[in-house]
Amino acid sequence: MKNIISYLLLSCVLALPTFTNAMEVVELKQPNSDKIVVKMMFRNGSICDPKGKEGLTELTATLISEGGAGNLTSSQIKDITYPWAASWYSSTDKEVTVFTFEFHKDFLKEFTEIMTDMILDPAFSPDDFKRLHSNQQNYVNEVIRASSDEEYSKKALEDYLFRGTNYQHMVSGTTSGIDSITIDDIKNHYDNFFTIDNLTLGIAGNYPQEYLDQLKTDLNELPSLETQLPLPDRAKRPGGIEVEIISKENALGSAIFTGYPLYLTRKNDEFAALMIANSWLGEHRKSYSRLYKKIREERSMNYGDYTYIEWYENGGRNMLPPPGVPRMSNYFGIWIRPVQTAEGLKKQYDELKDIKIGHAHFALRMALMEMQMLIDNGMSEDDFNLTRDFLRSYTKLYIQTPSRQLGYLMDSRFYSRTDYISELDELLKNTTVEDVNDVMRKYWQSDNMFVTIVTDDSEAEALKESLLGNTPSPMAYSDALKATLPDAILKEDEEVQRYPLNVTKVTIVESDKTFR
């Protein structure tokens, strides 16, 4: 109740799911397809993890999809299905868990028997549990810190944004949470949360009606929901720009992710207008966007710089936003891919031997300055028309496969829509430049943000001092690069390096103390 009241005060109420002891069914008929896609979306994600058992939902889902089922071991399932070219996987996010199955219609009967056994009669064998539990432990304890500082900074920002809430911990859990999970916890969680009345069934392809009827009958063997689903908590509101620097030994650069609560989702029609502004400022992996041009192209600082108005799953690998990760507790984010540290620059260029910090402070200043300029000045009519036309074409690529199309249809139901992509096209078509500028002023700001920076331990203290003191942060170029830059960029640099940030707090956290 407390969370709902808070949202009302902010003129934004979370749309909470209601359950009627009957699964919702989403159909996508494709008469010319030889492939059948089945998706099962359970409205239980990591926010359903019990306190002290963080990571339980994902581990349960992984054990269902990658373990044995019925009388078959996981190895036997793989051997049997190999000639069928069937595939399946599970994905868990904050509020949903989705199982996806794809198979040829010629093996409909045979594969469906295995598929329904996975969902209705998972083996939960000790050997499978030990193997998958170990894999998840390794990810939480090692992989997230070692494999990609970019992904690390994103997960760290969510930890910061949602600290003290059920959204805080990584979907994969925490060190102590994973360590405490037993196979009995898995079985109890399955019984309590993988239920018929929080299930949406999706099916695409050329399937007979009697097949769908039988599948619905089979899935009705799932138990009814007896445990009340938790409400998704909202992100904290930052008081100024609050920075958490994660000090990591031998980090190759400074990976930055910053954001603040955004009380807007696909459920709201205004979301389409904000998509246009976001695309112009920092569309994911697009070189036409403003931040990409300013930070990467003109200054060669990093690989890319992007902005987001909703969670973007695995942005390091995905060129298009995937379905299956719908969220009602939303936030705006800026992803500044790693920029160089002072240590790295000194090793490359003798002329930079006296610098104290690398490019992180400058890059953060430039991103927030550009964002505020857009809010203050608005988009031009020409930029608006080009960006809107691009999005009307580009968003159709979101559903270029049957699986993605079905996934987006199911996500649409989560947001109380029918067909988000079709509805989005109509919304974009009817949006004006005035709508975009109004919605920016309504939902965007640059003075209050949480920032996480994963950086080398040699950089942490100096960067903290620079941020807290709002110290000028000159852009550090090699002599060779600086000689090629036009005067306009160097003049702009002088403005950026002194751009005031509303920094109110900076803390340093040792890398090995995160996600514990």
Image: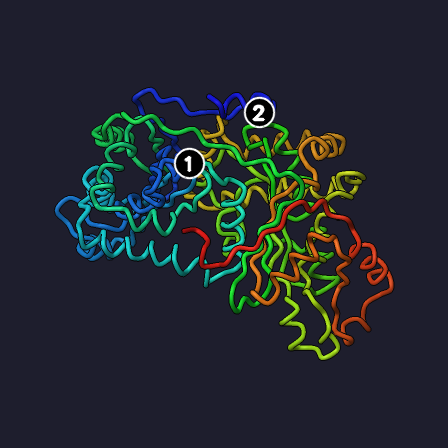
Which quarter of the picture shows residue 246?
Answer: bottom right
The extreme bottom residue here reads 350
Callout 2, which amino acid?
A: Cys
Where 495 falls versus 165 (above or below)? below
User: Where 490 falls versus 182 (above or below)?
Assistant: below
x, y (%) of residue 427? 63, 30
- How packed mark 2 is, by other alpha carbons closer than 10 Å (few <14, some 14-19, many 20 or more), is some
Q: Left or right: where does residue 411 sit relative to residue 445?
A: left
Look at the image and tell me whether residue 36 can be seen. no
Under mark 1, the amino acid is Glu
Q: Nearer the viewer, residue 2 or 432?
A: 2
Q: Nearer the viewer, residue 87 or 105?
A: 87
Q: Which mark is residue 493?
A: none
Q: Residue at x 20, y 42 (%)?
A: 184
> CB of mark 1 within 8 Å of CB of mark 2?
no
Residue 127's spot in the image, x, y percent? 18, 55
Q: Is residue 397 left or right of residue 413?
A: right
Color scheme of the displayed model: rainbow
Q: Left or right: 429 with respect to 94?
A: right
Give the spatial CA distance, label 1 vs label 2: 18 Å
SS state under label 2: loop
- In-image side of 428 versus 324 (left or right): right
Disc 1 is placed on an element classified as: loop
Image point (60%, 25%), residue name: 10
| Residue behind mark 2 | 12
Residue drawn at x 81%, y 67% as measured from the top left: 485
Q: For mark 1, does the 10 Å Cα neighbourhood hold few (<14), some (14 to 19), or many (20 or more) residues?
A: many
Query: Which residue does the numbered mark 1 point to in the structure image?
Result: 95
Of mark 1 and mark 2, the one earlier in the sequence is 2
Residue 68 placement (x, y as % from top left): 19, 49
